[in-house]
Image: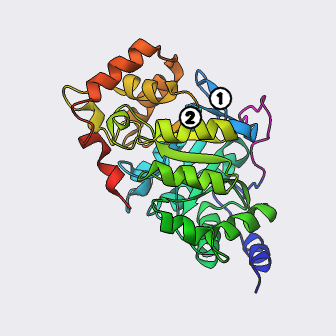
Amino acid sequence: MTRKMKRRTLLATGATVAGGVIVGTTLQRSSTSTPSSQVPTTRAMAERVLGNTGLRLPLLGLGGAGQTPLSWDGAEKEAIALIQQALELGVRYFDTAASYGPSEDYLGKVLPAHRQAVFLASKTAQRDRDGAWRELERSLKRLNTDSLDLWQLHHVATEQDLKTIFAKNGAIQALEEAKQQKLVRFGGITGHHEPTVIAEGLRRYPFDMILVPLNAADKHHPRPFAPVVLPLARQKGVGVIAMKVPAYGRLFKPGVLEGMHQAMGYSLSLAGVHCCVIAAETVDQLQHNVSVAQAFQPLNQQAMVGIEQRTAAAWEDNNFFRTWT
């Protein structure tokens, strides 16, 4: 059975949800896209266009892994409450992955009723074509949708990862085929280990977006992401999404940053960054994060330097994830 035939089977047997039949239409490629009338909003977050995609997204998206019920088994009630609150607060970008536990399942219970209004991103850590295809098909089924707005090659950390991905039967073939079949609108690459590997990925393939760690502590790492990745992404018109913005909350330990306003303010003020994704453990935490995004104003150079100085003595603790491969 070919992958295209499998796609037809998948769409024909797609599940329905409490909110109704799955809607497959995605956000329009327009600078004037507006939320669906199904989704109430508060004061809007500012939006930015993601590189050459022509797509505008709010500054803050909801992360689907880490310190959040979205990735915890047995936390469906709490996860659904978070997703629903995110929609009400104007969040449009929902980030998940095939490896994020029940995250895709939880999102698939809420988002289909709002599918036209949201930007839905998932990922695969498989490096070969067939493995990536299997995960894509599972992701679509779990998310109750017939397409993704963004599908990313997840956690690309080494030169060997790139070699396998770009081999004859590598995962890049699955991405190409999925885009041709309109199962995927945009393609991306993510990683938090080695910035030169992400940069090399951008040189080898015209990815639409990247998801990388960009925070004030990373400035002090011997191999920081911002100076390696951001200029190249800007040159190529790649959308840049910041992750690990508060470093799982470690940036808020005594003596480091004062709060999310400094963490998010720093990441979003880096030249070339378009938005960020941050997980939330509770509805109250999500509401606070959104309020910070709503109030965001780009920081001047003096403020940026001041935040960098506050993280200078704690950068190793706040970059623990850089060792993940």
**What distance separates the C-alpha of mark 1 from that of mark 2?**
7 Å
Residue 41: give x, y in percent of width and height: 62, 28
Residue 46: give x, y in percent of width and height: 61, 23
- Residue at left offset 76%, top offset 87%: 1
**Which SS class for mark 1?**
strand
- Looking at the picture, the colour scheme in use is rainbow
**Which SS class for mark 2?**
strand
Residue 211: give x, y in percent of width and height: 53, 46
32 falls in the magenta region: yes
Give the residue type at disc 2: Cys
Does 261 sit above or below residue 11?
above
Give the residue type at disc 1: Arg
Disc 1: which residue:
48
Q: Quadrant of the C terminus?
A: bottom left
Count of labels shown? 2
Q: Which residue sits furthest left?
A: 254
Tell me: 219 left or right of 9: left
Q: Which mark is residue 222?
A: none
Which segment did they paint magenta? Answer: 25-38
Does 282 sit above or below residue 175?
above
Instruction: Please name whichever residue, 46 or 115, is drawn nearer the observer in this view of the structure.
Output: 46
- Residue at left offset 59%, top offset 51%: 110
Q: Which mark is residue 275?
A: 2
Residue 122: give x, y in percent of width and height: 58, 57
Q: Is the Cβ of the residue at disc 1 closer than 8 Å to that at disc 2?
A: yes
Q: Residues within 10 Å of mark 2 (few under 14, many from 20)?
A: many
- Earlier-in-chain disc, 1 versus 2: 1
- Residue at left offset 76%, top offset 70%: 11
The image quadrant of residue 91 is top right
